[in-house]
Amino acid sequence: MIHIENLYKSFGKNKVLEGIDLSISEKGIFAILGPNGSGKTTLIKSILGMVIPDNGTISINGNSIKNKWNYRNEIDYLPQIANFPANLTVQELIKMIKDLRNLRGEDQQLIDLFKLSPFLNKKLSNLSGGTKQKVNLLLTLMFDSPLIILDEPTTGLDPIALLHLKKLILQEKAKGKTILITSHIMSFVEEMADQIVFLLEGKVYFKGDITALLTQTDEPNFEHAIANLLTKQNV
Amino acid sequence: MFKILKYSFFDLVRSRWSYVYLFFYLALGFVLLFLNNDLSKAVITLMNVIIILVPLIGTIFGVMYYYDSKEFTELLLAQPIKRADIFLGQYLGVAISLSLSLLIGLGLPFILYGLFQSTAIWDFVLLLVTGTFLTLIFTALAFNIALYNENKIKGFSYAILLWLFMAVIYDGLFLMSLILLEEYPLDTFSIGATLFNPIDLSRILILLKLDISALLGYTGAVFQKFFGTGLGFSMALSALVLWVVLPLLNIYRKSRKKDF
């Protein structure tokens, strides 16, 4: 589905991606992990075409995405920091995104689930961080695209919303979708992810499932295995 | 692109500043007409205001809107929309709403005063056309500046500098070079230098149309000879169109390569 070859990107002197090779062909949930600044968001933004790589190719379903935009019809993306136009209401924003994508979108169900109806007529600038994140999730998950990319989906969510989110992600997985997630909450990743992609110093350092990770690092549990990978970086 | 244009436009129509701008022109139009009591004279005074103010508002509004709608832009970039459409749509949203403020704000008082019975109607139309051109030009230049500068403060400073250069400094340099080079024939030079500054170009066009170019002495005669002909006039118009098209092409080019 997603095929990335030899991807390079630097911002000024800061080299972020240094030859990423990654192929994601199966369905299921893929967690992209790595220390802060390891290029997770840059990688995701490159897939979305928001960041233009210096070198390398990205193809989705066999077609290179360079200078294309149509392929984004197949992607639902949850940005890391929920930045919305401040003077729109939640309702208007939902309507606008539906209009821009020319899709109907199943928003009512998600509004009920996240109990957003009291906020529908509020301006986005007046919402709390957690509520903004719920709106953010709603905007992402109301469409039915085969590829879902979630950048730190758990940020600011209360425990109940987090439970709903996990259920939603599993529902989407059951529909046979490919889901990419970045997160710093290891328990969340351990619970959800089928495959781990670990980025270190701009390269894919590890790709495989959790059992493989445990054997490779020789650690008893997932959190320690990740810590092991992170400390290796300092050796 | 039209969807983006629609949303940007409605966003701006709802903003307070568009109304401040509109009411300013309404007030200016009415006050000038009642003070001057004469349409043609009001047109001349108006020209001096428009030539300086429209570029200033265009640049400031352009940069401000770009930085203000950064979140909106990022949201749009992840949607299945062509990149260039996002920026061109936003540009047109700003440029059209500013132009409308200008056209309605000045048009209304002049029409109420009896513009259609007046002989000054074509002078006035030319004034509005150049005003609209200046809005399109300076908003496009502002978008260029904002696209190249992540830093808001820098972007604003460059925008103000650009305006200051075009509206004030350019004329100074132009005059100085005329004085320094007075021993040489400067016809082509001065016409060329005018084409390179949209503000000067608009001013000359209006002055010629108003038939007060005699005030400009020899230079006026040279300009009259050049711009008075069909060829000169169409060259001036083409120069204005180029001033819109070139910055727009650069917006298109730059927006394709930028990271967000």
Image (cartoon, coloured by chain):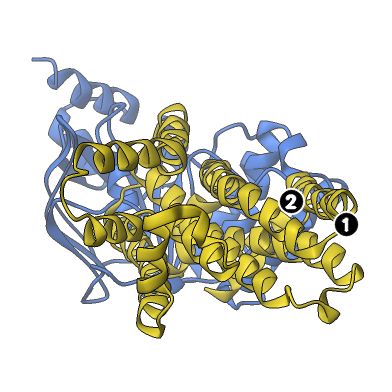
Query: Closest to the observer: A26 or A181?
Result: A181
Q: What residue appears at the point 47 percent right and 60 percent down from the top-left corner?
A: B204
Q: Amino acid at mark 2?
A: Ser
Identify the residue under disc 1: B37
| Percent of width and height locating residue B190 | 29, 55
Q: Earlier in the sequence, mark 1 or mark 2?
A: 2
In this rendering, the answer to whether A19 lies above or below A227 is below
Pointer 1: residues within 10 angstroms few (<14), some, or many (20+)? Answer: few
Left or right of B162 on screen, residue A81: right
Query: Closest to the observer: A111 or B78?
Result: B78
Which chain wears blue? Answer: A
Q: What residue appears at the point 59 percent right and 61 percent down from the top-left corner?
A: B131
| Percent of width and height locating residue A154 | 54, 37
Q: Chain of mark 2?
A: B
| Percent of width and height locating residue B38 | 83, 61
In this rendering, the answer to whether B218 lies above or below A62 is above
Which chain wears yellow? Answer: B
In this rendering, the answer to whether B163 lies above or below B246 is above
Identify the residue under disc 2: B18
The reply to whether the C-beta atoms of the residues labelled 1 and 2 are less than 8 Å apart is: no
| Percent of width and height locating residue A94 | 70, 61
